[in-house]
Image (tube, coloured by chain):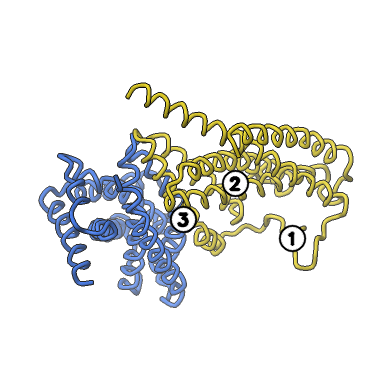
Chain colours: A yellow, B blue
Amino acid sequence: MSGKGIRSTGTALAVLGLVGMLLVYSLSFFWVATDRLQGVSQRIFYIHVPAAWTCFLAFGIAALTSGMYLWLRDERLDRAAVCAAEGGMIFGAIMLTTGPLWGAIAWNTYWNWEPRLVLTLLLWFIFLGYFMVRTSTEDPEKGKRFAAVVAIVGALLIPLIHLSVTWFRDVPQFLHPQPVVVKPEGPTLDGDMLTVLLTSLGVFTTLFFGLFLLRYALETLRAEVQARAREATA
Amino acid sequence: MSAYLGQIRAIVWKDLLLELRTRERVVAMGAFAVLAAVLFNYSIDRTVVQPQDIGAGLIWMTIVFGGLLGVGRTFHLEAEDGAFRGVLMSPVPKDAVFLGKMLSNFVLLYVVSLLVVAVFMLFFGMELGTSPAVLGLVLALGALGFVALGTLFAAVSAGTRMGETLLPILIFPVLIPMVVYGAGATGRLLAGRPVSEVVGNIRMLAAFALMAVAVGAVLFRFVVED
């Protein structure tokens, strides 16, 4: 795809995502029925779960492209990694703020040490380190390599970290809700709720890829500007 | 293989000799450990909690922070006159450089870890438990995992403008298994529980250390390449 193609696809997807977001909000506030047990607070689920999914998707892409960058040294892979990681930070921040808001009502506490909460918090901080390393090197090439190393260490050690916090003795009695959609016996979520959730998942994913492509196009332009500036001084 | 081991040994020997002559890092880390224990004493209100109850946690936090202090300076030893460039240009594989640096850091941190435990026993009257050898093994495996990640990230942070400030941000998130299994085992051993209760912890600590060493040895070449 040409630079222009990426930009227009990105714009189209981002606009589609933003319009879709209006749909998700109206569906989750006015259309779908209130949860019998949890009441109104359950509606945050239609934002929290898609944000979490998008965050993991984005960090997954970032880790994968980081690894491939160290291997192939293609600038485009590094660009994809940094753009995906930025998306992961944003959607991760949405997940990490909506979760505690729901928890305050459902669990009567904003935070507990349930393994899934810890996992997402640590992932978020690993990628904070990713950006800090990237921006604090004199030589941008070095920063790219360092950041890729941070992402790969995080990706490789996350399973063991998750295992260790699951094993920890103080796993709280209020557990994070179990999956209600992806289960061997099929979804147990009410039909309308499932519709809203799947719509929201689609919208969040679309918005993410829209922002991702826009950021990617911007990074490409920046690299071009730098290259031309170097040419001009040389 | 023996040539490879010889190369690692040469780097370990060089670093330890340098440390033996200057005593910079070991004195800093040792003084930190003792002074941290003094501060801990005054931070604990004994009408609320006894130091023995939270001793294992404090011991591990002291090791972690003291370790950062020393390991963070791994690559400052050779910062002057481009000495590290010389090490990298020598016909030694990069992973051998990493393993050598890591092992010399390990020796340093292990000595400090034992000192930390001794200081806590002395200051807070903590008992060593019934199996000091097992406690020594737990500390060794924990220290090994720490220095593996610490050496890798020290190389990263030494190449940035932020320097050691960056090190805790990089290393703390991936250090959780070491603290969970290490402090857990230490707490139980200090409380005199049987060794059978900590076998699981020791296995997981070993797995963590092994993974950390492998990850560091593989990724180090990408950090130091020029």
Q: Are marks 3 and 2 in contact (CB under 8 Å)?
A: no
User: Relative to B74, is A134 on the left or the right?
Assistant: right
Q: Nearer the viewer, residue A77 or B127?
A: A77
User: Relative to B71, is A203 on the left or the right?
Assistant: right
Q: Position of residue A88 (x, y in %)?
A: 58, 43
Quadrant into which the N terminus of chain B falls? bottom left
Say which residue label 2 marks. Answer: A58
Q: Nearer the viewer, mark 3 or mark 2?
A: 2
Q: Secondary structure at mark 2?
A: helix
Q: Nearer the viewer, mark 2 or mark 1?
A: 2
Q: Is residue B180 above or below residue B78?
A: below
Residue extending farthest top: A232
C-alpha separation, residue under disc 1 versus residue under disc 3? 29 Å
Instruction: Determine if marks 3 and 2 fall on one subunit.
Output: no
Q: Is residue A52 above or below residue B97?
A: above
Residue sitting at x 47%, y 38%: A131
Q: Secondary structure at mark 1?
A: loop
Q: Position of residue B31 (x, y in %)?
A: 23, 47
Residue sitting at x 20%, y 72%: B2
Q: Secondary structure at mark 3?
A: helix
Q: Nearer the viewer, mark 1 or mark 3?
A: 1
Say which residue label 1 marks. Answer: A182
Q: Are marks 1 and 3 in contact (CB under 8 Å)?
A: no
Q: Chain of mark 1?
A: A
Residue sitting at x 32%, y 38%: B163
Q: Residues within 10 Å of mark 2 (few under 14, many from 20)?
A: many
Say which residue label 3 marks. Answer: B176
Q: Amino acid at mark 1?
A: Val
